[in-house]
């Protein structure tokens, strides 16, 4: 049964109930008629709004359909975390690791879209949503999952991240930010860590690092000039999972702003953006009752993929969370009732959002992979 049919059935049912209620009231025929007409107009408005949402979602799905590929971690039929690829609209989903003896997670395409970097853990290992970059072995494979190679020993090359040209990787050791040559594994550069303890990311223009630090307050997003080592704070207090916009000028991150009353005062994690200098902070997406994580900006800078989970942690502790794609020009977006959030942000939209399968830590590449042959895949057309 389609959503359209379900909506129609609900509307008819509401009308029948309303008419039944009206029939029990001592009202004139004209009064009953007026109330029924008012109810019908309200339902027609609701249905029109739902059609508008469906049309907006369909247009967005068409826009992103051929915009490269996404990769993400998800629980497979074998019970372990595997890596999956699909088109951004969810079509042609395929398990590209399918290993029962390992857990694979946190995959990232290389800047040219030809390789994958990810971490592989023994089967049954619980992935730590705040420490996944320290776990398992670093792996490098072709973008379609073929030819996987073990790059390091257990725990080696923590929080590894591609350099903009794909020839080096940056990591966080116990005291420093370190850069290694990918071909030789030789140390190229070492610089102060500046309190960064997770999620180190290299800007596309090669000039900056950003990461989550305990500088001043836990969960502070910082930016570091690679040439000078100079640091500036981008966003303070309870922030995480930063990543770069393609222009290297802005950073996207998850934030749980202070002062929220929901969830017993703990609050909910929202998706934000800011300039690398910390200015122009703006809400992208939020929903009271949900935590937004795992954000990645599309290679053309027009869209964002992220996850929405009812519990903090982004779904790593369970089996992942529902993934969504939104259009940045539609932001800020607030969904659900979200009474408290809507009071703070009055000029917002409710979508559209493209729902995707349950997953964790998605990444997006514009390059074509799998030789363009979309075979042996789940053709989930959207």
Image (cartoon, helix red, strand yellow):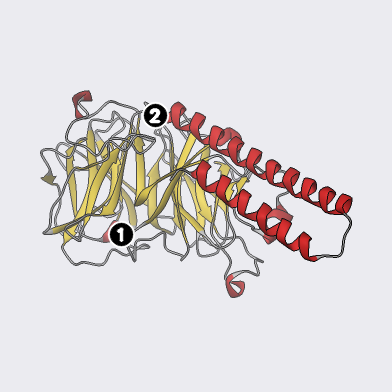
Task: Specify whether 161 is left or right of 284.
Answer: left
Vertical side of 186 occupied by 19: above or below: below
Q: Disc number at residue 65?
A: 2
Identify the residue position indicated by label 1 in the image: 132
Task: Specify whether 125 is left or right of 26.
Answer: left
Front-most of 235 and 94?
94
Q: Position of residue 49 (x, y in %)?
A: 65, 40
Front-most of 247 and 331?
331
Label 2 Cα crowd, 10 Å radius (few <14 / some 14-19 / many 20+): some
For marks 1 and 2, the one nearer the N-term is 2
At horizontal 13% and vertical 38% (from top left) the residue drawn is 146
Residue 217 visible (yes or no) = yes
Q: Which circle, 1 or 2, is nearer the viewer?
A: 2
Quadrant in which residue 109 is drawn: top left
Q: Position of residue 221 (x, y in %)?
A: 51, 53
At horizontal 61% and vertical 60% (from top left) the residue drawn is 257
At horizontal 14% and vertical 39% (from top left) the residue drawn is 184
Label 1 Cα crowd, 10 Å radius (few <14 / some 14-19 / many 20+): many
Task: Specify whether 90 is left or right of 238.
Answer: left
Task: Specify whether 221 is left or right of 331.
Answer: left
Q: Secondary structure at mark 1?
A: helix
Quadrant in which residue 176 is drawn: bottom left
Residue ranking furthest to the bottom = 264
Q: Secondary structure at mark 2?
A: loop
């Amino acid at each position: 049964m389609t959503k359209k049919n379900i909506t129609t059935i609900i509307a008819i049912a509401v009308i029948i109930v309303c008419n039944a209620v009206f029939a029990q009231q001592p009202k004139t025929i004209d009064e009953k008629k007026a109330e029924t007409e008012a109810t019908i107009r309200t339902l027609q408005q609701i249905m029109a709004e739902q059609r508008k949402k469906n049309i907006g979602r369909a247009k967005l799905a068409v826009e992103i359909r051929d915009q490269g590929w996404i990769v993400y971690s998800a629980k497979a039929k074998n019970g372990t975390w595997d890596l999956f690829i699909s088109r951004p609209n969810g079509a042609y989903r395929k398990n590209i690791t399918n290993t029962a003896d390992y857990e694979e997670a946190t995959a990232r395409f290389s800047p040219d879209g030809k390789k994958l970097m990810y971490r592989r853990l023994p089967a049954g290992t619980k992935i730590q949503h705040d420490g996944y970059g320290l776990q398992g072995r670093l792996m490098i494979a072709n973008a379609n999952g073929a030819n996987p190679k073990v790059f390091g020993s257990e725990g080696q090359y923590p929080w590894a991240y591609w350099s903009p040209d794909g020839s080096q990787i940056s990591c966080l050791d116990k005291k420093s930010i370190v850069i290694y040559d990918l071909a030789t594994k030789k140390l190229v550069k070492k610089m102060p860590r500046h309190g960064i303890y997770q999620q180190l990311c290299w800007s596309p223009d090669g000039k900056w690092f950003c990461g989550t630090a305990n500088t001043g307050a836990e969960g502070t997003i910082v930016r570091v000039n690679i040439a000078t080592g100079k640091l500036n704070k981008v966003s303070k207090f309870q922030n995480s999972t930063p990543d770069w916009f393609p222009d290297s000028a802005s950073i996207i991150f998850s934030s749980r702003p202070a002062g929220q009353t929901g969830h017993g005062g703990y609050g909910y994690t929202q998706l934000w953006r800011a300039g690398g200098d910390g200015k122009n902070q703006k809400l992208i997406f939020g929903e009271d009752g949900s935590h937004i994580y795992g954000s990645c900006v599309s290679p053309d800078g027009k869209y964002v993929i992220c996850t929405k989970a009812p519990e903090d942690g982004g779904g790593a502790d369970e089996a992942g969370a529902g993934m969504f794609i939104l259009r940045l020009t539609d932001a800020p977006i607030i969904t659900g009732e979200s009474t408290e959030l809507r009071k703070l942000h009055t000029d917002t939209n409710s979508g559209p959002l493209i729902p995707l399968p349950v997953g964790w830590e998605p990444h997006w590449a514009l390059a074509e992979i799998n030789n363009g042959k979309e075979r042996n895949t789940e053709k989930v057309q959207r």
